[in-house]
Image (cartoon, rainbow, N blue to C red):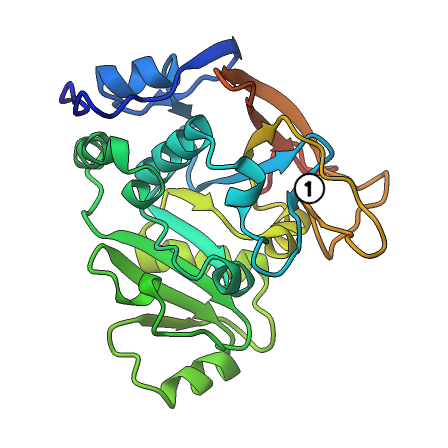
Amino acid sequence: MTSGRVPPRHRLPTITTLFDGSDGEAAPLSATLRDTYDGPLTFPARRPHVYANFVSTIDGLVSYGVRGQASASVISGGEPADRFVMGLLRACADVVVSGAGTLRVETKATWTPWQVYPAAASLYRELRQDLGRPERIPVAIVTASGDVDLSLPVFRSDEVEPIIVTSRSGAERLSERRTDWVRVRAVGEGEPSMRAMLDAIVEETGGGLILSEAGPRLFGRMLRAGVVDELFLTVAPRIAGRSEERPGISLVDGTAFDPGDAPSARLVSAKRSENGFLLLRYALRSAGHGTAAK
């Protein structure tokens, strides 16, 4: 494992661990990454392991839902600690998963660690080398319709290995276009089930650690299917509020749980940034199934 250094002009964020009850296999963080994260980053040994990452306001909004200001970065305000952890989680992942809806908002995203937090780019690259991860980041975009803009950076970047997981009709739609540089995986008819989607991603990438950066709608479907094991949630110290004119978008959208089947969570760790952001980590339990089903 390399020790890793950051150029002096780049100051990494200050993160303080308030509580850490995590266990499992520790990622081979360099001394600098470990010091910045204020401790080890571990993952349970069982694979596949799906962990999601969001940033929300105190009152639970992950997007203002306003045209031109719907991005998660508007919620976080570009908080360095949030972006550092986002990059760290991407660097550890075998594959990053997102959806077509998120892609329409985050049009410039490539889901690489160094894009979200360039100051730690060399540290993230060293970590991926130590983990035996490929240089190109596998990114799976889930879309039932196959209606995606193939000119976007995630499909054109030399640092990304793009995969589209779609329905058979979506794959047919894509086959009518030149997509030889993008892998397309067809999964069933209509909207792919979350279990079939996950199985296809694992088969395509060998993914053991799967990071979901899917939006609230796809995340809700994943929760319903019980395929999410952990949630990393940054809480921004601001309140967005709601109104009929400005309802905003919460952590889960398009899926509602009854009291008897609502997923529960166990706090795994809590950290604080110097700017007052909380960096929380939860292990998720699907009702009646213990931890998220495999």
Give the left or right position of residue 228, taking residue 140 as reference: right
Tell me the quadrant of the picture where the C terminus can be found: top right
Quadrant of res 74: top right
Give the left or right position of residue 202, taking residue 267 as reference: left
Residue at the image point whose x is 20% and y is 60% from the top: 158
Coordinates of residue 258 in the picture (x, y in percent):
85, 44
Badge 1 crowding class, 10 Å Cα cut-off, few under 14, some 14 to 19, many 20 or more, is: many
Mark 1, residue position: 61
Give the left or right position of residue 104, taking residue 87 as reference: right
Q: Nearer the viewer, residue 39 or 95?
A: 39
Q: In the picture shown, does residue 43 fall above or below 180? A: above
Coordinates of residue 179 in the picture (x, y in percent):
30, 79
Q: In the picture shown, does residue 166 fall above or below 269? A: below
Residue at the image point whose x is 78% and y is 52% from the top: 247
Tell me the quadrant of the picture where the N terminus can be found: top left
Coordinates of residue 194 in the picture (x, y in percent):
57, 58
Quadrant of res 132: top left
The residue most toward the bottom is 176
Secondary element at image label 1: strand
Quadrant of res 154: bottom left
Coordinates of residue 6 in the picture (x, y in percent):
19, 24
The residue most toward the left is 2
Residue 294 seen from this side: no
Residue at the image point whose x is 52% and y is 40% from the top: 52
Q: In the picture shown, does residue 119 fall above or below 267? A: below
Residue 15 seen from this side: yes
Q: Nearer the viewer, residue 237 or 207?
A: 237
Q: Amino acid at mark 1?
A: Leu
Residue at the image point whose x is 68% and y is 37% from the top: 289
